Amino acid sequence: MKNAFLKEAETKKALADFILSTDRLSMGNHCSKFEVSFSTKQQRSNAVLFNSGGSANLAMLQALINLGRLNTGDPVAYSALTWSTNTMPIIQMGLEPIALDCELDTLNVSSQKVKERYEEVPFKALFITNVLGFTADIDQIKKFCNENNILLLEDNCESLGTVLPQGRTGNFGIASTFSFYVAHHMSTIEGGMVCTNDKELADMLKIVRANAWDRNLDKKKQDELRETHRISDFESNYTFYDLGYNLRPTEITGFLGNYQLQFLDHTIDLREKNYLEIEKAISENDDFHNLDHAHILKLSTFAVPVICKTKELRQHYLNRFDSSGIETRPMIAGNMQRQPYYTKYVKQLFELSNTDLIHSNGFYCGNYPELSTDDIALIISCLEK
Ligand SMILES: Cc1ncc(COP(=O)(O)O)c(C=O)c1O
């Protein structure tokens, strides 16, 4: 992403005007307004705004622990092709991380992989990541979780706007997280969200987000808590009900969220168009594995994932991108089990052949709405055999 925002100049001007005119910059009405507009867009009844996608993931797990729906020691399966701050709170909270392999043609965990691992280790929760706008058969994963009483959580930080015939990604689990970091589908500079239809969970997320006090809850819920714990209105200012953090966004986050949301649909269309054009070059070159997204109605990408057939080929194409002045990145964190921090804390490791292949042979470059015809032609030229 070259810019921090969609419609950069216009957004910066609006932000400057907002800062000059507002008398409040800490979390307030702009954040609440963004929560309402985002939950409407995502078609979930609750959205809780955070200061990052990582914070959203942390809070989601903490809230489930506070509610007793997850307990220390519970096995939590997760997509091994993911981001560090998905797995870290699993470890930090004393849960047991169980790595799942992905499918090579979708980059995602499939119901088959979920079932195989569940037979080995019956896990309590499944925290999947919808990788780079793609999914596998997430509807079948949901069915399996429902049948086996598994809590399904979705990290949708990389897939805001992807739509399947069965619904939008982020709406299959009991809760889902989003990131508004600069390079994602829409930016609030830093920012994140948890969406859920579960009001009890949404209330606990608000407690976890802000010091574990009740100030951001509705009156009915506040009264309930204050009555249970015999707390006066005066004491309630500094009463802390459960385990929490300070993960609050600012009004700048809220203002930017509302502003950027108006451009989201259009930019998702542009990114999809860019991706499909570039993908043709990938499918015409037998140095690469192809990705399958025939089951996806709207493919909301923000990067172009490339999986080379060998490690040597990856180096060859990385050199080409580099000499053309195009930045590349590893395919997220690769196999999370191979990250230095992981084996320090986790002893149970699993064989993950597809994720390993992506770890050693995969990379991606950016796909953002301002890419010009020349930019796209340059990326395509780097992907030709
Ligand atoms: C899948 C996934 N989850 C979570 C995050 C963390 O989001 P943030 O950078 O907003 O903390 C990222 C970051 O890129 C991500 O790719």
Image: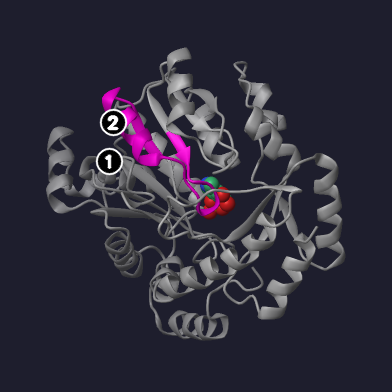
Magenta range: 127-153
Instruction: Decide if residue 78 is on the left or right side of residue 203.
Output: right
Assess whether residue 213 is covered by the magenta stretch.
no
Left or right, 287 with reference to 118: right
Picture coordinates of residue 88, whole percent (x, y): 56, 34
User: Which of 273/178 is in front?
Assistant: 273
Residue drawn at point x = 73 percent, y = 54 percent: 285
Tag 1: residue type?
Leu
Dot 2 amino acid type: Leu
Q: Which numbered marker is on residue 201?
A: 1
| Residue drawn at the location 34% of the way across and 70% of the way down | 30
Q: Position of residue 218 (x, y in %)?
A: 18, 53
Q: Are marks 2 and 1 in contact (CB under 8 Å)?
A: yes
Q: How is the image coloured?
A: one colour
Position above or below: 153 against 56: above
The answer to if 132 sits in the magenta stretch is yes
Q: Quadrant of the N terminus?
A: bottom right
Quarter holding residue 40:
bottom left
Q: Is residue 309 left or right of residue 95?
A: right
Residue 67's tag is 2
Residue at 70% over, 35% down: 357
Q: Earlier in the sequence, mark 2 or mark 1?
A: 2
| Count of marks placed on residues | 2
Kindly state the secondary structure of the residue where label 1 is placed.
helix
